[in-house]
């Protein structure tokens, strides 16, 4: 559980100030993430509306529905995976910080960097497999087993895109310490 930001996280806004290319890339990714967060908020509201509509039409009109649940799941999958990079950029993912107070700031930076490298390796594998799954769904024309039968490539591409953005965000966080000027 995180109660306060890690000591070295307060300077994230100027983390790449020493390298204009990294700083520009960081700003571009932040703008992209901000846009995605707004779209994800709209998707969450839409999922709430779709599910509420589903409940009301079944309860009041005894009308069967066959598309609402899947539409809501697609919206939720998109919102969850596409905002992962934004959350990572804020260091908002769950982390065990039992040793943060015990370690020096330098050791904490090394710890964060090693965690980022391990996270990148996992997320890169996940993104690669997600793109493989999306490609297979697209090529094979896979659809869900419901009466509505939407293409499964939609949630798979959202999942793969979100994981790819997460990899880019983590890669940026891995590169930032190397872009800072060396103190003398």
Image (cartoon, grey):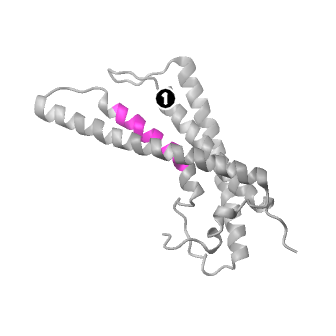
91 displayed left or right of 62: right
On the image, the x and y values in percent for residue 82 come to 52, 43
Residue at position x 60%, y 50% in the image:
30
Image quarter hosting the C terminus = bottom right
Closer to us: 141 or 9: 9
Q: Is residue 49 left or right of residue 5?
A: left
Magenta segment range?
70-84
Q: Is 15 colored magenta in this rendering?
A: no
According to the image, label 1 marks what residue? 154
Question: How many badges with numbers are in the image?
Answer: 1
Height in image: 121 above or below 147?
below
Q: Position of residue 59 (x, y in %)?
A: 13, 35
Residue 140, position in %: x, y?
Answer: 54, 18
Between 86 and 167, the residue placed more toward the observer is 86
Q: Residue at x 76, y 62 (%)?
A: 177
Nearer to us in this view, 90 or 104: 90
- Which residue is at a point 77% across and 53% down the rendered structure image? 20
Q: For residue 114, what is the image quadrant?
A: bottom right
Residue 171 visible somewhere in the drawing: no
Secondary structure beneath dot 1 equals helix
Vertical relation: 141 (above or below) 73: above
Q: Quadrant of residue 49?
A: top left
Image coords of residue 133 (percent x, y): 57, 30
Instruction: Name the dominant secondary structure of the magenta segment.
Output: helix
In the image, farthest residue toward the right: 184
Residue 128 can be seen in this image: yes
Which residue is depicted at the point 55% across and 68% down? 96
Q: Is residue 23 left or right of residue 148?
A: right
User: Residue lying farthest bottom?
Assistant: 102
């Amino acid at each position: 559980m995180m109660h306060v930001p890690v000591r070295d996280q307060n300077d994230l806004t100027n983390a790449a100030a020493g390298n204009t290319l990294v700083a520009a890339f960081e700003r571009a990714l932040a703008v992209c993430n901000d846009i995605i967060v707004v779209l994800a908020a709209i998707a969450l509201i839409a999922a709430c509306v779709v599910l509420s509509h589903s409940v009301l039409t079944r309860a009041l009109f005894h009308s069967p529905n066959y598309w609402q649940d899947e539409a809501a799941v697609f919206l939720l999958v998109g919102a969850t995976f596409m905002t992962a990079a934004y959350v990572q950029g804020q260091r908002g993912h769950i982390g065990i910080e039992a040793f943060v107070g015990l370690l020096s700031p330098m050791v904490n930076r090394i710890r964060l960097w090693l965690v980022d490298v391990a996270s990148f390796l996992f997320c890169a594998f996940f993104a690669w497999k997600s793109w493989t799954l999306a490609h297979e769904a697209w090529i094979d024309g896979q659809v869900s087993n419901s009466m509505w039968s939407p293409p499964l490539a939609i949630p798979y591409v959202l999942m793969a895109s979100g994981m790819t953005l997460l990899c880019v965000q983590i890669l940026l966080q891995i590169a930032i310490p190397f872009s800072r000027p060396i103190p003398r």
